[in-house]
Amino acid sequence: MGWWPCPDCCGGGGHSCVNCNGGSGPSNVSVSVSGISNNTCSYCSSWNGTYVLSPGVFNCLYTTCVSLSSPYCSGGLSGTATVIYVDLVISSSNIQVNFEPRRTCLNPFPFNSTRTVWNDSSFSGDCSPGAPYTPTRTTGPSTNFCDYSSATMTVTF
């Protein structure tokens, strides 16, 4: 018997996720982003990289918030550090990734104008280790601080 609140998912598989075949999601998810380039903000290209997401507080949700050592360029605000907040939601027929540079990891909602949303509707329940997906950017950002026109994303379970 496992520990609360995850009594049945921690032994051999991953996180409980009803939308994955067998009801067990991955232990973590890697999200790799490339092709973000600078526009009016000279730090955007530093946001390219791989982000490792851990199970969140809800079923089929994975999150991370990573501090980066570059100033924040959003809404005319500046600071000493940028964080990148990333979450991934596995639904029955889609993987959605929210990617957002912001000032703090606290209170990730509501999202702001720097958020980009990526979707892969080819998802069919395969959450097995190594399963790759290539979501495409479907919305955002509504600011022009960074150039996402050549950005790509790969999600690996």
Image (cartoon, rainbow, N blue to C red):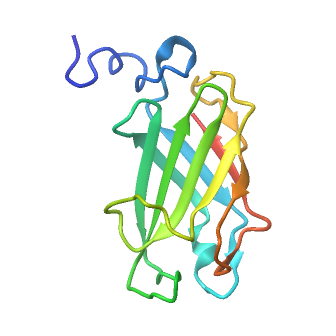
Q: Position of residue 104 (x, y in %)?
A: 36, 69
Q: How far across and how far down the image is residue 2, in percent?
A: 23, 16
Could you tell me how many numbered marks the image carries? 0
Residue occupying the point 69% across, 58% down: 139
Instruction: Determine the residue positioned at 42% across, 62% down.
Output: 66
Q: Quadrant of residue 50?
A: bottom right
Q: Residue furthest front?
A: 110
Horizontal side of residue 64 vs 123, given as left or right: left
Front in this rendered view, residue 74 or 150:
74
| The furthest residue to the right | 150
Q: Is residue 95 left or right of residue 111?
A: right
Whether 48 is drawn above or below 12: the answer is below
Q: Does 123 appear above or below 117?
A: above
Which image quadrant is residue 113 in?
Answer: bottom right
Residue at left 58%, top 73%?
46
Relative to the observer, which residue lies in front, 136 or 26?
136
Question: Residue 94's spot in the image, x, y percent?
Answer: 65, 34
Q: Quadrant of the C terminus?
A: top right
State whether residue 100 is above or below residue 90: below
Residue 153 appears left or right of 97: right
Establish if 122 lies above or below 141: above
Point out residue 36 in the picture as x, y percentages from the top left corner: 69, 69
Locate the N terminus and report the quarter of the image it occupies.
top left
